[in-house]
């Protein structure tokens, strides 16, 4: 009972207007870093490169790529901070949860989503020490995957978010949904 009341108080404080931007930025960073950790582990243990099978000494030893995680954390900081203000803007510009309002929000998401992810992708690449040319080459190879997943995967899930949840939990839902999307992005960014 006591733990439940303390947890409720902490959550109410974290999702209060005073701390919501910090909470959303922390959630966004944690989602990208967590997804990257899963992808790094999966890359090593689930779908290793053929060369890794040939090197028996390296096959069992996992070495975490810290620079990659720092890059994803930088992308997560941007993702959480910008996402907080983006959803705040959408909820002020289009208040309510009618089908017409949700449709307007989804249209805005469809337009701004791919450029938003592109900036995140650029931040990750630059933080990881990649050149602009390396980023651009990778970007050209992956942009269709990003657009397709944004429009046909993420947007239908966003309809649920915009229709059912109150604005203060909007980004929490986005981060939860995007944790899976972030796994995909981490895979795409580092394939």
Image: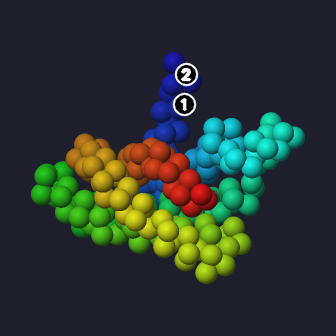
Could you tell me if residue 167 is visible in this image? no
Within 10 angstroms of label 1, few (less than 14), some, or many (20 or more) residues? few
Residue at mark 2 to residue at mark 1: CA–CA distance? 6 Å
Asked if disc 2 and disc 1 are in contact, CB closer than 8 Å, the reply is: yes
Residue 5: percent from left, percent from top:
50, 27
Residue farthest right in this picture: 57
Q: Residue at x 56, y 70 (%)?
A: 138
Q: Is residue 5 left or right of residue 111?
A: right
Q: Is residue 13 left or right of residue 59?
A: left
Residue 45, disc: none
Out of 138 and 50, give the one closest to the viewer: 50
Dot 1 falls on a residue whose secondary structure is helix
Residue 126: percent from left, percent from top:
65, 73
Q: Quadrant of the C terminus?
A: bottom right
Circle count: 2
Q: Residue at x 51, y 25 (%)?
A: 4
Q: According to the image, label 2 marks what residue?
A: 2
Quarter holding residue 177:
top left
Q: How was the colour assigned to the protein in this rendering?
A: rainbow
Q: Is residue 93 left or right of residue 84?
A: left
Q: Residue at x 27, y 66 (%)?
A: 108
Q: According to the image, label 1 marks what residue?
A: 6
């Amino acid at each position: 009972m006591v733990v439940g009341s303390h947890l409720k108080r902490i959550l109410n404080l974290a999702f209060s207007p005073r701390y919501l931007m910090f909470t959303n930025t922390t959630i966004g960073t944690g989602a990208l870093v967590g997804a990257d950790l899963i992808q790094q582990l999966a890359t090593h243990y689930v779908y290793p490169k053929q060369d890794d099978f040939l090197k028996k000494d390296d096959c069992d030893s996992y070495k975490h790529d810290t620079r990659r995680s720092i890059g994803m954390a930088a992308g997560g900081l941007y993702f959480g901070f910008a996402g907080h203000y983006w959803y705040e803007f959408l909820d002020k510009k289009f208040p309510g949860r009618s089908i017409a309002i949700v449709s307007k929000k989804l249209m805005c998401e469809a337009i701004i989503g791919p450029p938003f992810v592109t900036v995140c992708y650029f931040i990750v690449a630059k933080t990881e020490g990649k050149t602009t040319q390396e980023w651009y080459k990778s970007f050209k190879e992956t942009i269709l995957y990003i657009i397709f997943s944004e429009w046909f995967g993420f947007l239908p899930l966003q309809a649920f978010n915009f229709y059912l949840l109150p604005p203060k939990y909007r980004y929490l839902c986005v981060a939860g949904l995007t944790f899976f999307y972030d796994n995909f992005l981490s895979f795409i960014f580092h394939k």
